[in-house]
Structure formats: structure tokens, C-alpha cells
Image (cartoon, rainbow, N blue to C red):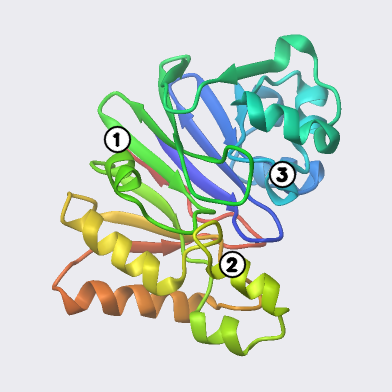
């Protein structure tokens, strides 16, 4: 299994995963040409994609979904509520490219097992995903305002997790955002802070997680060094040793090989 966060942040989100013959994008929230270039940078031709999976309908996750699906006849997977809500943003798809799943029910793309699970965000029916193939597993969990017990259960036992570390609370509170937007970000339907991400990883460490990628960092209310150091300090305080990496807003992260 191969996993690469191509872009991760409020300006756009897109990750690539390959397992067996399945080649999957999770979200396509930037211009199509940017995503095509990022794929080619990791030696993946866009025309070889098997699927585009959507987490929720916000534009930083769906901007190029329609463009890429129509250009390469790639099936798009989302729950029914998300399809209805994002129709205006992505345009009409070929009927054969509309694949509706039920949140909480797993399905297969080739040999890749996919499980969409409910998250807590201000969208109609947002989801995270876990992927498994031949004994290896990866999870993607961003855009959730709180970590509930069912979320810990959903992402326990993974080999690798992409987890949101969106903001530093002090930077957000002292920053220029309107109060209403600050409240939204801090709410149960908003985003996880660096501190919340650290505490989440600490609990998941106790369940066996040893490798995580921090993603969806805010350009205004966070920075990479601060996010990494905050999470590392929380883990270190409890003697937890975990491999950490960062997903960038503007360029592909490392390619992670799980064998």
C-alpha cells in the first residue's frame, strides 16, 4: 500500500492512495491542473485513477472533483446527502461515475477495502475513511470538531493515520478572524486544535498507533513548527514514541510505503 497526502489545508485538500490495482484520490479540492501535476510528480498518471472519494461538500475538498471525473471518466464515491449538496459545485457527472455509499458500511474498490465513518463537522454528512489491503491499513481524519468514542474506535489499529491539527488556540483567539468564524472553528462542528490532535494521538498510541501525519493546518492560525512541537510535547510527556510527519498545504508530502 502507498499513501501520499498531496495537499492538506483550508486552501485545498487531496490525498492519493494505491493498493494493488486500485488508485484512489480522497477529495480533490484544488484546481485540476494542480492535482494532475502533483500526481505526475509521484509518477501517477491521472488517467489511471480508479476512484475519487469525497469526505464532504466544502469547496476545499471538491473543487476539481467534477473536472477530473469528466476528463478521465473516474467514478466518484460519496454518500447520497453529499452528492445532493455538492452537485452545484462539481457539475453533472456521467451516471456511470456516480457511486453512492452508506456511511458506516464498508465497500471495495478492487482489492482495497474502504470504510467511511461519520465525523463531526458543519457539512451535511461528513465522513473520514479507513483503508485496508493485505493486512495494512491507513486512515484519514480531518475536519472534525471533536473526537468522540466512535471515532477512536474507527481509527484504532491502523498502521498510519492522517489527522487534523488545524490551529493553535491562542493564535486563533488573538488573530483577525471574525468572532463568529472563531466560534465555528472552535465548536464541535469545527476543527481539531494542535493540542486536541496531540491528545488524540496519545490515546491512539495506547491502542497501537505508531505513525501519524498531521494535516489541514491553517495558514493564518498555525504553523508547521508549532503544530509539530505541540504534538511532540504531549506525546513525550507520557513517554509515547511515535513517528510524525507533516502534510503541506502547497505541495505533496512524502510518499509512505506500507509493506
- Of residue 95 and residue 186, the one placed in the foreground of this image is 186
> Separation of disc 2 and disc 3 at Cα?
27 Å
Q: Position of residue 6 (x, y in %)?
A: 60, 50
Assign the N terminus to one quadrant of the image.
top left
Q: Secondary structure at mark 1?
A: loop
Q: Secondary structure at mark 3?
A: helix
Residue 165 visible here: yes
**From the viewer's perspective, is residue 236 above or below residue 112?**
below
Mark 2: few/some/many CA within 10 Å (<14, 14-19, 20+): many
Q: Residue at the top extreme?
A: 96
Residue 45 visible here: no
Along the polypeptide, which appears first: circle 1 or circle 3?
3
Dividing the picture into quarters, in which one does residue 9 lie? bottom right
Assign the C terminus to one quadrant of the image.
top left
**From the viewer's perspective, is residue 179 above or below residue 204?**
below
Along the polypeptide, which appears first: circle 2 or circle 3?
3
Q: Position of residue 69 (x, y in %)?
A: 76, 25
> Separation of disc 1 and disc 3 at Cα?
26 Å
Residue drawn at the location 45% of the way across and 48% of the way down: 141
Q: Secondary structure at mark 2?
A: helix
> Separation of disc 1 and disc 2 at Cα?
37 Å
- Of residue 178 and residue 69, the one placed in the foreground of this image is 178
Dividing the picture into quarters, in which one does residue 104 lie? top left
Q: On the image, numbered disc 1 is attached to which residue? A: 259
Q: On the image, numbered disc 2 is attached to which residue? A: 185
**From the viewer's perspective, is residue 147 above or below residue 89?**
below
Residue 75 lies left or right of residue 237; in this view the side is right
Q: On the image, numbered disc 3 is attached to which residue? A: 35
Amino acid at each position: 500500500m502507498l499513501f501520499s497526502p498531496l495537499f492538506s489545508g483550508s486552501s485545498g485538500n487531496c490525498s492519493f492512495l494505491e493498493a494493488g490495482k486500485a488508485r484512489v484520490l480522497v477529495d480533490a479540492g484544488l484546481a485540476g491542473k494542480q492535482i494532475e501535476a502533483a500526481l505526475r510528480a509521484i509518477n501517477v498518471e491521472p488517467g489511471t485513477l480508479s476512484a475519487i472519494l469525497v469526505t464532504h461538500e466544502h469547496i476545499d475538498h471538491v473543487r476539481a472533483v467534477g473536472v477530473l471525473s469528466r476528463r478521465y471518466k473516474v467514478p466518484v464515491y460519496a454518500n447520497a446527502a453529499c452528492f445532493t449538496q455538492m452537485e452545484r459545485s462539481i457539475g453533472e457527472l456521467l451516471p456511470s461515475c456516480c457511486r453512492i455509499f452508506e456511511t458506516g458500511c464498508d465497500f471495495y474498490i478492487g482489492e482495497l477495502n474502504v470504510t467511511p465513518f461519520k465525523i463531526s463537522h458543519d457539512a451535511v454528512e461528513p465522513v473520514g475513511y479507513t483503508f485496508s489491503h493485505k493486512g495494512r491499513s491507513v486512515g484519514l481524519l480531518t475536519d472534525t470538531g471533536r473526537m468522540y468514542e466512535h471515532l477512536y474506535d474507527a481509527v484504532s489499529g491502523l498502521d498510519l493515520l492522517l489527522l487534523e491539527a488545524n490551529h493553535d488556540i491562542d493564535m486563533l483567539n488573538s488573530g483577525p478572524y471574525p468572532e463568529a468564524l472563531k466560534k465555528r472553528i472552535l465548536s464541535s462542528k469545527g476543527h481539531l486544535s494542535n493540542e486536541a490532535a496531540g491528545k488524540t494521538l496519545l490515546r491512539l498510541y495506547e491502542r497501537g498507533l505508531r505513525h501519524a501525519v498531521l494535516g489541514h493546518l491553517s495558514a493564518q492560525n498555525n504553523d508547521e513548527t508549532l503544530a509539530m512541537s505541540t504534538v511532540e510535547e504531549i506525546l513525550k510527556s507520557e513517554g509515547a514514541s511515535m513517528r510524525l510527519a507533516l502534510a503541506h498545504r502547497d505541495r505533496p508530502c512524502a510518499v509512505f510505503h506500507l509493506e
